Image (cartoon, helix red, strand yellow):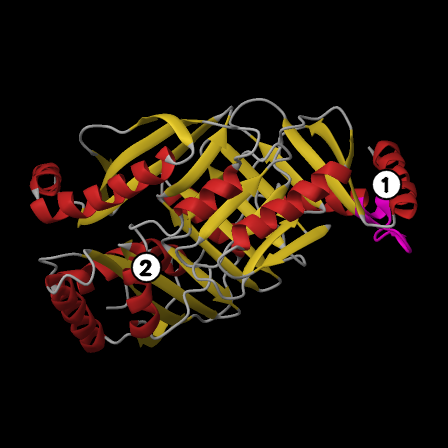
Amino acid sequence: MHAGFEEVCAKAAAEARNAGRPVLALWREEIERVEPLLPPSPSRSTFFWAGSGLTLLGLDRAATFVAEGSNRFNDVRRAWERTVQDMLTAGPGDRDTPALVGAFSFGDGPGSLMWVPRVLVAQRPEGAATLCLAARADPVHGVEDDAARTAWRAAGWLAAGAVSPCPPLPVTGHVAEELPSPREWKELVARAVALIGEGRFSKVVLARRLRVRLPYPPDLGGLLHTLIGAQPGTTVFAAGTGTRTFAGATPERLVAVRGGRAETMSLAATLPRGGTGGADARLRDELIGDGKSRREQAIVTEALRGALEQVCHEVDVPGTPEVLDLPNVRHLCSRVSGRLADPETTGVLDLAGLLHPTPAVGGHPRPEALGWLREAEAFDRGWYAGPIGWVNARQEGDFAVALRSALLDGDSATLFAGCGIVAGSDPERELAETWLKFRPMLSALLNDQGDLR
């Protein structure tokens, strides 16, 4: 491994000097599986993904792509495309392994960040894992980090990550802030319903945040391990730097592109699970038969259909939604897919920019709903409800919508939850729904010690 990576780094340094611009070196090889594959102690940058049959762990950064504004997806796509054109790759590993990871902010402001990890491990439920080592060669200074040292650090990180985390101890936290407050939230929901009645928009998605103080900073690896076990059917993710990390377990895919096909998900409407088999079945039937829930989910489905029809042939949309059952809630769900009209020019970042924000996290019509949200919401969502995911060198990849999440910063955890407001939405029920959506992260952080209410 050392020799092969050192060789491709030396070639990248020479190419960078000759071309007068940076060149990325990438080495891939198969390694033994790492179980469990979890982040060790915080590195300069950490990315974690466990969902859709793939687990990724990326550590540190070899190259960074920062963007903002309405063209941020296209800006990153073009920068990544130029990087791939110059990139030198070597090694026997899978060439379609993810290489670029990160997250985009919900809004157009700063905060979107994608990067190539210095060390990345990708593995599926069966078979070997793929290790990717990356280094950036500068035309003046050469390779930014010694190749042998990068490989040595990778071995240390993987050994640390393979240690099973200790089960988290029960802890007691306290609410430091609710924004909006329960009273303000119900007033905001009522105002949104009134504007819907006036025809300003047909749906808008409002968000709340809950800041909790913990007795000590949570262990990231242990938290992710808990979420994986407690939230089946979700994508568990983490992205961040040092002690400041955004993590969660989201049930919603934004878009995946693979083999010339695009897949997205229309997820909307929420009801709790029942405490008994009979109660659970009744709640399931109630969700399927609820006109308000069906209208809310249909708005999302039709928006996704219209977006995919711009770039796809043969868009497939189920006639009726299915019910997605999660441990504490359930949603209406439709899986929408299509064959890309031009896979050579349309990649996953193009689709992410086209679809985000869907009516499931923003509203409909998009301009009117987002315009009002900018006035009405009292905080910047940051990465909450934005796209988080990965891209490979062929512009394929997978992005989830960053829901059921929290920003971890030392002993503080800021949790986020949102609700789709349509005609007939009840403020009290929408408030209760935010607590249902806070619950997955609260349970993981507090080791299932309640929801602090």
Q: Residues within 10 Å of mark 2 (few under 14, many from 20)?
A: few
Secondary structure state at the residue bearing disc 2: helix
Residue 380 spot, x, y in % from top left: 42, 69
Quick one: 86 or 4, which is closer to the camera? 86
In the rendered view of the protein, which quadrant contains the N terminus?
Answer: top right
Residue 165 spot, x, y in % from top left: 54, 48
Residue 112 lies left or right of residue 351; in this view the side is: right
Mark 2 or 1: in front is 2
Do we see residue 416 in this rendering?
Answer: yes
Residue at the spot 20% in from the left edge and 49% down from the top edge: 270
Residue located beneath label 2 in the image:
367
Q: Which residues are magenta?
A: 136-150
Residue 332 spot, x, y in % from top left: 21, 40
Residue at the spot 34% in from the left edge and 75% down from the top edge: 378
In the rendered view of the protein, which quadrant contains the C terminus?
Answer: bottom left
Quick one: 322 or 407, which is closer to the camera? 322
* Residue 313 image-quadrant placement: top left
Residue 25 spot, x, y in % from top left: 79, 40
Residue 377 lies left or right of residue 276; in this view the side is: right
Looking at the rendered structure, which numbered label has been put on residue 12?
1
Marks 2/1: CA distance? 45 Å
Residue at the spot 54% in from the left edge and 66% down from the top edge: 110
Q: Amino acid at mark 1?
A: Ala
> Circles 2 and 1: CB distance less than 8 Å?
no
Q: Answer above or below: position of 327 versus 261.
A: below
Secondary structure state at the residue bearing disc 1: helix
Q: Earlier in the sequence, mark 2 or mark 1?
A: 1
